[in-house]
Amino acid sequence: MVKARPARNPRVAPPLSAKIVFELPLQLRARCVKTSATPNPLSGSTAGDTQSNMKIHEYQAKEILAKYGVPVPKGEVANTLEEANDVARTLFAEGAKGVVVKAQIHAGGRGKGGGVKVARTREEAELYAKNILGMTLVTHQTGPQGQKVQRLLIEETAAIDRELYLGIVLDRAAGKLVFMASQAGGMEIEEVAARTPEAIFKETIDPAVGFGAWQARKLAFALGLKPAQINQAVHFFQSLYKAFVETDASLVEINPFITTADDKLFALDAKINFDDNALFRHADIKALRDIAEEDPLEVEASKYALNYIKLDGTIACMVNGAGLAMATMDIIQYAGGSPANFLDVGGGATQEQIEHAFGILLSDAHVKAIFINIFGGILRVDRLATGVVAAARNLHVTVPIVLRLEGTNVEEGRQILKESGLNFQVGATMKEAAELVVKAASSVVRHK
Ligand code: GDP
Ligand code: MN
């Protein structure tokens, strides 16, 4: 049971209702503080876009959808300018009136950021490919540092009549998948959800029955599709649902889903996230992971089975247990600071893991102080203390470290810290430790 808790620090609270915050799995909540996450339009949460959901590129999503019978424009991925020219040449030779050059990064909003360009000639296509390949594309989802474009998708252009929206997500409150459709395609669905929620049509899917043709038809009519398009749409939606279920997806989004002047339907853009917990049964999908698109520190952490998510603040946290990690982030905010990360070293962390964890925390240039909050259960406090002392020595840690320790062998642990001769501060309570670390961070100036 999730108990009600008091109101939250207003700096974290605004986009989320308290109910959602506490029902969100821990990693997801950690993501909530991240500005670059894609909110789930159903709940205003970030459930659709988290660490535990592997992302893939648009071109990969389209390859998967095509296998399930979802119509996608003709096109191919290109890793170099030469390959881009080849694809464009072939498409024009096969009768394309134009091609669209699309940056492949794990973030949306590429169109507005200059990462999607329509070319009428081969020369124009080459020019766009040259400009986009290698550029640092900044969109509302990449964060201000942007993302380097390493691949392009070159596709035949479609004669767009209407831009619509389709999405399948899990409705956590209902415990069921929801198929969403909207006439407001090409726009950000979170905005539509916030301003005109009635413009999003939803069909809740009974897991025992599946997504019914009648539901697909209902959505097709709600979208105002023409009679000549209805049957195609039903097939399209059902294929999309089948793809979602069979790949163990956590999110499928087609934005825009388009109709053409000659009554055809296409997925013009495609986004699929997968449930990490099911990847073990999809070796082919697992192989689509593109580490170059992920945060390097998070990739490093995953190598050592550390549960790490980078955030934007200045106080690094090292904590055992995800619940305690969440509470630690909360209390840092409460004390007036901001967490630099979510880090759960797990119940049985080894000294090696603790050292790696330190390394990761310290390579974040924003970190001004470290807060170690450990409740020693399986992980005995003396063992942790030994690990912390060794890591602090080996890595020449210079930023202040504040600890709050409780649990098995806590006295021995405190003794080890004291005898190390290193400058650790220990808080008697979690609140006191949080206040100490916020104070310590505010007096540190760090240059990279
Ligand atoms: P996003 O901005 O990252 O979501 O990228 P999209 O793939 O959705 O592309 C953004 C916008 O570019 C779409 O909403 C379309 O308006 C436009 N666009 C994409 N492909 C084509 C195309 O083949 N033809 C035309 N005319 N416009 C396109
Ligand atoms: Mn899009």
Image: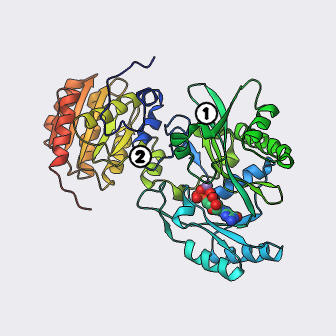
Count of number-bearing discs: 2
Mark 1 to mark 2 CA distance (whole Å): 21 Å
Whether tag 1 and tag 2 are in contact, CB under 8 A, the answer is: no
Q: Which residue lies under the disc numbered 2?
A: 34
Percent x, y of residue 350: 38, 37
Residue 117, quarter of the rendered image: bottom right
33 relative position to 372: left or right? right
Q: Secondary structure at mark 1?
A: strand
Q: Which mark is residue 107?
A: none
Percent x, y of residue 312: 34, 49
Residue at image position (14%, 36%) is: 419
Residue at image position (68%, 83%) is: 123
Tag 2 or tag 1, which sits nearer the N-term? 2
Quarter the C terminus occupies: bottom left
Residue sitting nearer the eye, 38 or 357: 38
Furthest residue in direction bottom, as rendered: 123
Cβ of mark 2 under 8 Å from ligand 1: the answer is no
Q: Secondary structure at mark 2?
A: loop
Ligand 1's image quarter is bottom right
Q: Which mark is residue 170?
A: 1
Cβ of mark 1 under 8 Å from ligand 2: the answer is no
User: Residue flagged by tag 1: what amino acid is it?
Assistant: Leu
User: Residue flagged by tag 2: what amino acid is it?
Assistant: Lys
Residue sitting nearer the eye, 197 or 233: 197
